[in-house]
Image: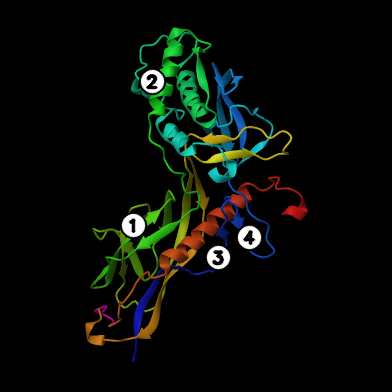
Amino acid sequence: MMKKALKGSLAAAAGLALGLGTSGIALAQDGEAAPTAVTGTYQLIEKGITLNGEIPGENMDVRAQLRGLKLNEGDVRLVYCIQINVGMNEDVDHVESTWEAVGVDNLPEVLGVLLAGYNGSNAAELIEAAGASGEDLGDFNEAQVAYAGTQAAIWSLTDDWTPDADPTEGGQGVDNAVTKIKDYLRATEPVDEPDMDPYFETDDSEAVVEGDTYGPFTVSTNLGSVTFAQPEGATIVDENGEAVTEFVDGQTFYVKFDEGQSGPVALTTDSVIWTTPVGRVFVPVNDEEDPGQNLILAESHEEELAAELEFEIAVEDVPATTPAAQPQLPQTGTNLTMVAGIGGAVLLAGVAALVLMRRRAATAGADWGSDDDK
């Protein structure tokens, strides 16, 4: 005997088969050009403070300029240098890469510094936390001092840079403030590389049937949010039974089916928010003779991705093993034996493809070598 059962919540209605490579570049379908990761162009935000010091075997006085990258959608985000002895090439684009590909030492410690350091908007708070409030900054402002202290901490990790007895070009107050910030940030804990692969998963391991409602589902995602239109034939609700139109990380939701519903219902996304997190690294796209400086992102970059991607909650015939014990939708007699199953994995594939396809459009024209290399 066959009975109706709800199976495959949020399964993608259209099969999208793009995957993610370890370098952040999607694996294209046959005949398609490979989409690229996020790219940015260099921007000088503000002149910085010269730091006096050395790397092993060499004097190294360097200027901690406040640097930024203008990313895909036009936002300028604060970045720091992670190669003290490589010049800054200001005329080339930078493309998102992985820590492994960059090969810079101590990046988990650097990310710990970044998460506590100057991010473009917290100079006063950082100076206070480092115990440097009240120092005479002379001709320099709080942002320049906060950036210099953070950059000094980063270079001490990536290049073993150590300051001289006179650590900056400023007066004693600037010397004190930059040193205190550097020392404060060096005491932070290391943090693992952030996940650059977008994912969306739902867990229904604790879900139960309550009348015409199945749940809870718990969302796990590194997407900022996914908004959607309510489907015909069902309503996505929260734990209070209130309709919701957005999925975010950690959210709990339920699927409430309409009376008499016995066919598939479709869920269509309106938009997806993707965040490029603090700690992502960007490398110059140019020839090896003039490599340019590798950069690390100090503030997250969020962009809204337009989306019209359908997901389906399908109703299928399945064998009924113990009819009397199976839960019923009371008005229709339909068995509600399982919602989700493979749904999270399929949704993940769809959203990942969507994000990377959007990135490809935003970064068209990046130089990835000759036609033979693509």
Q: Pick the residue in front: 101 or 31.
A: 101
Q: Kindly identify which numbered label has been placed on residue 28.
A: 4
**Amino acid identity at mark 4:** Ala
Q: Mark 1 and mark 3: span between their CA atoms?
A: 26 Å
Q: Which residue lies under the disc numbered 3?
A: 16
Label located before the other in sequence (1 or 3): 3
- Indicate the secondary structure of the residue bearing disc 3: loop
Q: Which residue lies under the disc numbered 2?
A: 127
Q: Which residue lies under the disc numbered 1?
A: 244
Extent of the magenta region: 328-332
Residue 93 higher or lower than 207, as above or below: above
Q: Mark 4 and mark 3: span between their CA atoms?
A: 11 Å
Q: Mark 4 and mark 2: span between their CA atoms?
A: 47 Å
Q: Residues within 10 Å of mark 4 (few under 14, many from 20)?
A: some
Label located before the other in sequence (4 or 2): 4
Residue 237 higher or lower than 126, as above or below: below
